[in-house]
Image (cartoon, rainbow, N blue to C red):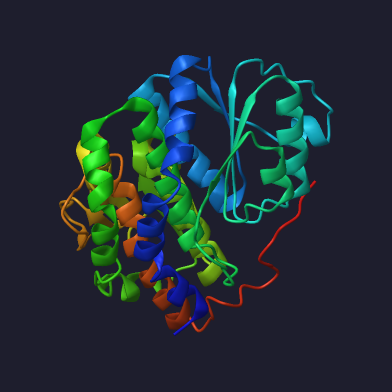
Amino acid sequence: MSVMLEEARQCAAVANRLLATDADLYDRLAADLEREPPPFVAMLGRGSSGHAASYGAFIIETLLGVMCGSLAPSTVTLHDARLKTDRALALAVSQSGRSPDLVQTFHRVKEGGARTVALVNKPESPLADLADTVLPHHAGDENAVAATKTFVASLVGMARLVTAWSGRQDLADALTALPDRLEEALSQDWSRALDVLRPVDHMLVIARGASLSVAGEAALKLKETCALQAEAFSAAEVMHGPRVLVERGYPILGLAPSGPDADSTVKTLAELARDGANVLCAGAPVEGGIALPLPAPLHPMLDPIVTIAAFYPFVAALSVARGLSPDQPRHLSKVTETI
């Protein structure tokens, strides 16, 4: 078993551990945010952590109505921008907490007056040292270059924060059941997709809404572990230009676990299948496509987490099927320190 797959199989246990600890941290932060609501949330992260930040932005905007924006570190590190972040919430996501561009940008927004929160796997790190509140992943050491359990921990931490902040009981109840759903997801059989994707060198990953961030993560993992040029698009955005790429047999992976996001995604995937695309879809069935199984829906804001957990064992198997090792992606290292 690869190290990546071994760590991916810990996702349910990591989620359970994260949800069982630090109640005082989440409750205190949520109470502070309710008492002094931020005018906006500035999200910070790169790679898998950047996708986790995008997920957080979506559920914050959807469930709390607070506008979110993604910070571009180069505005600070290369252009020395002075950001006006008074009373804002700055939320940084990182596995290592060490990348210089993230640390420098986090420092700048703190100087600008933002409340700083770091969701990190390494509570003793430069990024965490700058945070007013540190929300640990509790994922343990992650040795595989391709992040799995720390990405899931980032999503679960985001969902837990939004649950506490919003006071949504439906989300709180669903979070309680999430570790069991993740365990179920890890045993889903996506082997039907192996023959489709083993020989290809390019593809699209399509989703919408809360699932778009995990589509980005899936595309990144397909690049990292399978050397496959996979690009993620919104099910709406793909119709505004990228559709021209589709020809007979063009491979597309759709992620459509539940809710109105899934309905929209399925409609788009069905059109692309009629264009000749070879459509694989996790979740809702698509006319003319190949169905990939997921556990029963839990909550529209949490089902993307379940979806990515089901994807990880598959992509590790696809890497091996393509004659590669998911633990040895060329040119990459575990911690990427950009400036």
Q: How many marks?
A: 0
Front-most of residues 205 and 203: 205
Answer yes or no: is residue 199 visible. Answer: no
Image location (x, y in percent) of residue 212: 40, 42
Q: 44 above or below 33? A: below
In the picture, measured across the screen, residue 298 lies left or right of residue 193, that is: left
Front-most of residues 218 and 109: 109
Could you tell me which residue is drawn at 41 percent across and 61 percent down?
14
Q: 223 above or below 192? A: above
Residue 144 sits in quarter: bottom right
Image location (x, y in percent) of residue 79: 83, 29
In the picture, measured across the screen, residue 243 lies left or right of residue 145, that is: left
In the picture, measured across the screen, residue 232 lies left or right of residue 146, that is: left
Front-most of residues 261 and 32: 32
Image location (x, y in percent) of residue 226: 51, 71
Could you tell me which residue is drawn at 28 percent across and 66 percent down?
183
Could you tell me which residue is drawn at 59 percent across and 72 percent down?
143
In the picture, measured across the screen, residue 123 lies left or right of residue 79, that is: left
Quarter holding the N terminus is bottom left
Residue 331 sits in quarter: bottom right
Residue 196 sits in quarter: bottom left
Image location (x, y in percent) of residue 308: 37, 57
Answer yes or no: is residue 121 visible. Answer: yes
